[in-house]
């Protein structure tokens, strides 16, 4: 009944060589960025010392030939900050890729349906209400916990608002996210206005910074982000099908409403965990997916892992820049360097920036 | 009689909330059996696309029962429907940046595994689909550079990559010139022979429908008003009722009876 002949093997998707090149390049970027960030800074540390300290900490081997202050700088200050940059960058880039496909909107970023505004309100509330924001819980402070919960709850609320009888239309999700974000931002503005002498701490959180990174905070956010992006990676076929539109994705066997819930939930989890430990770092989640898409095309099988790697590497580099520039917020660096670079790419590939329809 | 593919009983469907529902299908009964080729006709808004949606399981009827291969449609998981039923939509914008073979491979979504690779089955199905849709030479072309006729071949290949037993096509010839339209329908007939696929095609062209389809169903405001071979189903009064136009019956040199509309003067 079916016409089966031995057909020539047909290639589709990126070739193995190209895949290796893209993912190898991304891995190299992450490693180089991490290495550079480990040895650069106000106290110069040699690569040999840095590697020896890492080895010593991880395996316990090797004689200790360095002062304990060096070990503290490498192991307690720089490395957690680097690892935080990696997971936050990877999580934001991955979430941005997912929202751009799910909402079929090139303006979509991880914050589009509200986690940033919710996290900001949570964090600022904690900063202002709790005199000493050091109440520990799961190894993180109250600010981090409020930010995380604020982000997740906001996305849940937006989703429930947008949900109608016949499903959750992408446009309604976008508009509901925008409206709820505006409302929460007004709350944040009100708190800022009344923040008094804590203004500096509030502003610094809102601008996004990895300066407060520590092992306990990384231990809180990293597993959440890694789990969510691992599960997102496995949904690449469904994300590709969604690029054909929701109706055709359904014809291809995707349970579209269920998929929206899963994708939104995982992306929100990754974003909220990232925001909790770094504040709202802008631009990475919007631009990295576009950069990678321009370079390698829209197939999520390669786009998702590549976005994660380049997101991780670029955020570590941006944070190094922020550190070397005297400790300015990393969110300023991502926008200052990312925006012109993105505009340049946009001009070169005016027709290239499209997400599906 | 061969196996039942689709069985609709007293199906009603509509849009809108409980307050202002617009009924689009009105107590539709329809039986479709394995290996049939059916042309679905009717004026714009008569419910053709909704009927296809009901058969594809994407539109849930408000009343009546739908069975797919003898099992109630509600019991079918989405992916399992997609392994049996493929839909060629009225219009589909192909996402820029993909090559033709990559888009056709999306037809494997309901079959493919959970991980990152493609199985040999997927490769073979995509190659077969491209060949059977006459789209082999398009395989490496970017989808943004296709002409209208080429696009339609790619959409046929996308549907075939699903290896469907039932193929639903919504106005596949509407945007095609006469050469591409006749190519498409003869290709569908050939697929029907080659793969034994059951086919429902929504058509607007009465002449094409009576030349091509062994069975014609005419919808009028959500009801089936004629069902049978074209010679029986496409009576002038049926067409006048369904479309509100006068037609005359003409016999072709090949001995086929076709209906030609009168232009109002």
Image (cartoon, coloured by chain):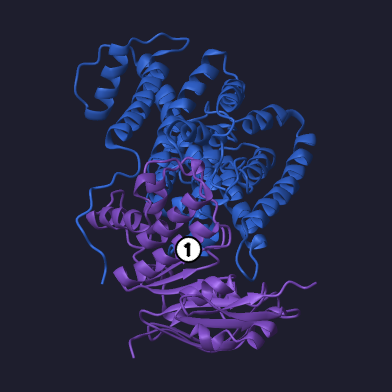
- Residue A346: horizontal and vertical position, in percent? 58, 28
Using the image, determine if residue A81 lies above or below residue B69: above
Point 54% across, 36% down: residue: A285
B252 relative to A107 in the view: left or right: left
Name above or below for residue B60 compared with residue B184: below
Q: Who is closer to the viewer here, A188 or A305?
A: A305
**Tell me, what hue is chain A?**
blue
In this view, the residue in front, B186 or B49, is B186
Observer able to see residue B56: no
Residue B253's place in the image compared with B66, above or below, is above
Residue drawn at the location 40% of the way across and 43% of the way down: A226
Judge from the rendering whether residue B223 lies leftward or rightward of residue B22; answer left or right.
Answer: left
Within 10 angstroms of label 1, few (less than 14), some, or many (20 or more) residues?
Answer: some
Q: Quadrant of residue A328?
A: top right
Looking at the colours in the rendered structure, which chain would you say is drawn in purple?
B
Return the x and y of residue A251 as percentages of the image width and height: 47, 65
- Left or right placement of residue A174 versus residue B103 in this view: right
Chain containing mark 1: B
Image location of residue B122, percent across then percent down: 29, 56
């Amino acid at each position: 009944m079916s016409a089966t002949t031995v057909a020539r093997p047909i290639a589709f998707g990126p070739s193995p060589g190209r895949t290796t090149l893209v993912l190898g390049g991304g891995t190299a970027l992450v490693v180089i960025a991490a290495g550079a960030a480990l040895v650069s800074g106000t106290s110069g540390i040699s690569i040999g010392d840095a590697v020896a300290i890492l080895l010593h900490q991880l395996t316990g081997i090797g004689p200790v030939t360095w002062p304990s202050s060096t070990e503290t700088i490498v192991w307690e200050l720089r490395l957690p900050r680097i690892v935080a940059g990696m997971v936050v960058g990877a999580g934001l880039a991955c979430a941005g890729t997912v929202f751009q496909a799910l909402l079929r909107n090139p303006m979509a970023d991880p914050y589009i349906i509200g986690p940033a505004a919710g996290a900001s309100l949570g964090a600022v509330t904690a900063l202002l209400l709790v005199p000493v924001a050091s109440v520990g819980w799961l190894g993180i402070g109250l600010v981090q916990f409020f930010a995380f919960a604020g982000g997740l709850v906001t996305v849940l609320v937006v989703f429930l608002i947008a949900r109608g009888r016949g499903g959750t239309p992408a446009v309604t999700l976008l508009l509901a996210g925008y409206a709820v974000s505006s409302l929460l931002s007004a709350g944040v503005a009100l708190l800022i206005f009344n923040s008094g002498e804590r203004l500096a701490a509030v502003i610094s959180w809102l601008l996004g910074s990895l300066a407060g990174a520590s092992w306990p905070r990384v231990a809180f956010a990293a597993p959440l982000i890694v789990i969510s992006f691992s599960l997102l990676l496995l949904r690449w076929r469904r994300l590709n099908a969604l690029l054909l539109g929701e109706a055709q994705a359904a014809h291809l066997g995707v349970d579209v409403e269920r998929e929206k819930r899963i994708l939104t939930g995982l992306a929100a989890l990754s974003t909220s965990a990232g925001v909790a430990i770094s504040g709202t770092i802008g631009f990475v989640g919007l631009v990295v997916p576009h950069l990678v898409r321009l370079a390698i095309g829209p197939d999520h099988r390669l786009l998702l892992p590549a976005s994660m790697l380049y997101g991780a590497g670029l955020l570590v580099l941006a944070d190094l820049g922020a550190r070397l520039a005297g400790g300015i917020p990393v969110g300023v660096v991502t926008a200052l360097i990312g925006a012109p670079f993105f505009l340049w790419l946009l001009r070169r590939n005016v027709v290239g920036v499209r997400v599906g329809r | 009689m061969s196996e039942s593919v689709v069985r609709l009983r007293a199906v009603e469907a509509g849009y809108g909330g409980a307050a202002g529902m617009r009924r689009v299908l009105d107590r539709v009964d329809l039986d479709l059996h394995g290996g049939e080729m059916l042309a679905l006709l009717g004026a714009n808004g008569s419910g053709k696309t909704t009927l296809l949606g009901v058969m594809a399981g994407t539109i849930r009827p408000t009343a009546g029962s739908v069975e797919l291969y003898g099992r109630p449609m509600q019991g079918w998981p989405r992916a399992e429907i997609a392994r049996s039923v493929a839909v060629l939509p009225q219009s589909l914008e192909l996402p820029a940046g993909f090559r033709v073979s990559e888009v056709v491979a999306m037809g494997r979504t309901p079959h493919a595994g959970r991980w990152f690779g493609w199985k040999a089955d997927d490769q073979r199905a995509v190659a077969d689909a491209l060949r059977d849709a006459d789209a082999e030479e398009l395989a490496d072309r970017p989808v943004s550079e296709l002409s209208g006729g080429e696009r339609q071949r790619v959409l046929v290949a996308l549907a075939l990559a699903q290896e469907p037993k039932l193929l639903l096509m919504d106005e596949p010839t509407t945007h095609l010139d006469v050469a591409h339209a006749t190519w498409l329908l003869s290709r569908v007939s050939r697929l029907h022979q080659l793969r034994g696929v059951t086919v429902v095609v929504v058509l607007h062209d009465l002449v094409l429908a009576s030349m091509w389809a062994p069975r014609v169903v005419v919808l009028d405001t959500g009801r089936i008003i004629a069902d049978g071979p074209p010679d029986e189903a496409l009576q002038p009064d049926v067409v006048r009722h369904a479309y509100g136009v006068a037609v005359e019956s003409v016999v072709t040199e090949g001995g086929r009876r076709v209906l030609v509309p009168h232009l109002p003067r």
